[in-house]
Amino acid sequence: TIDLPTEFNISNNYPNPFNPSTKVRIATVENSVLTFTLFNSNGEEVSSFTKEYAGRGIYEEEINLSGFPSGAWFLSVKGENGKQIKLLKLLYLK
């Protein structure tokens, strides 16, 4: 059997450091819409996407930085209300 989550949670990315991709695990207890925004080490927005998760479950998002320079990156995860839920520091090593 699969254990369904009892609370909303976003885990730290794994692996970290990574090359060229890392995964973030999202546990939801209801329908959720999240916006993921990638920032470089200067705080400049590089890319963004929004994803809807239907119902309770555990989901994984792959963050792929191939084509980007190695170094420190930041991933902001915001909820439907625009409030930041989690800020992850990603370490991309080539």
Image (cartoon, helix red, strand yellow):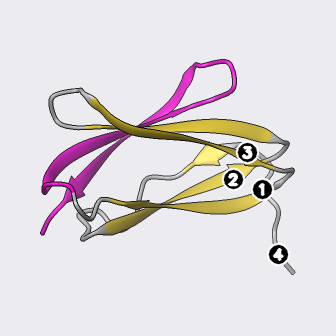
Report the number of discs: 4
Rendering quarter of residue 46: top left
Q: Nearer the viewer, mark 3 or mark 2?
A: 3
Amino acid type shown at disc 1: Pro
Residue assigned mark 4:
2
Amino acid type shown at disc 2: Ala
Mark with earlier residue (4, 2): 4
Residue drawn at x 51%, y 52% as measured from the top left: 11
Query: Is label 4 in contact with label 1 (beta carbons under 8 Å)?
Result: no
Q: Residue furthest bottom?
A: 1
Left or right, 10 with respect to 62, comes to right
Left or right, 35 with respect to 28, comes to left
Rendering quarter of residue 69: bottom left
Is residue 69 inside the magenta stretch?
yes
For label 3, the SS is strand
Amino acid type shown at disc 3: Glu
Q: Which mark is residue 40?
A: none
Q: Which mark is residue 5?
A: 1
